[in-house]
Amino acid sequence: MAETKDPLLIKRYASRRLYNTETSDYVTLEDIAGFISEGREVQIVDLKSGDDLTRQYLLQIIAEHESRGESVLPVDVLTDLVRSYTTQAQSMVPQFLAASFEMLKDSQSKMMENMSAIPNPMAQVPGFDALQAQQQAFMKAMMANWPGAASGPSDDDAATDGDSKGEELDEIKKQLAALQKKLSGM
């Protein structure tokens, strides 16, 4: 669904059915959650009174996800939210939550940008260099045990020699290098 600046208008009928004014069909809470996940702003209004019911339905969507075990909000946070409705700190909570979620969104997008900018994101994992060095040492040890690998002809000799063993060895070396490259990419 294309993003627009205007929120998607959903009207609630007296029967409590939700009507998508863009597509002229009825929608469910799950549909609305999908629109929001796709980046769409949604506004839900009561058809008869014109009251904005968006907050009520968004809370209902969250409650349904939480009841299915898709926990995002720890009990401590929920408890503090309930407490905030009964204290003087109530006026600070919405601004704090909005700022916190904005920081979270910014951090996630920066992290994704950084991950896509790195040719091999695994290179940033602590200990990756040591693991790669171990792989190279293992490959060298394996190659040392193969007949002719350590004392065999060099690449130049094999190319001019035309020796089938030298060509096979070159092919094996290429395959091992390709495998090592794949392993490093993991």
Image (tube, rainbow, N blue to C red):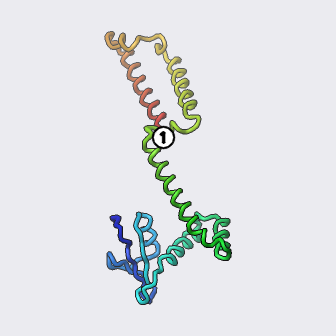
Disc 1 residue type? Pro
Nearest the camera: 93 or 7? 93
x then y, percent, for residue 45: 43, 81
Relative to 99, 159 lies left or right = left
Query: Does the rendering let one see residue 73?
Result: yes
The location of residue 65, given as percent across then percent down, is 54, 69
Residue at 53 percent of width and 56 percent of height: 104
Q: Choose top left, top right, bottom left or bottom right for residue 176.
A: top left
The residue depicted at 32 percent of the width and 79 percent of the height is 24
Quadrant placement of the N terminus: bottom left
Residue 17 in percent (x, y) is at: 43, 83
80 left or right, relative to 44:
right
Q: Is residue 116 above or below residue 76?
A: above
Return the x and y of residue 69 as percentages of the image width and height: 59, 66
Closer to the camera, 154 or 92?
92
Which residue carries the number 1 mark?
A: 121
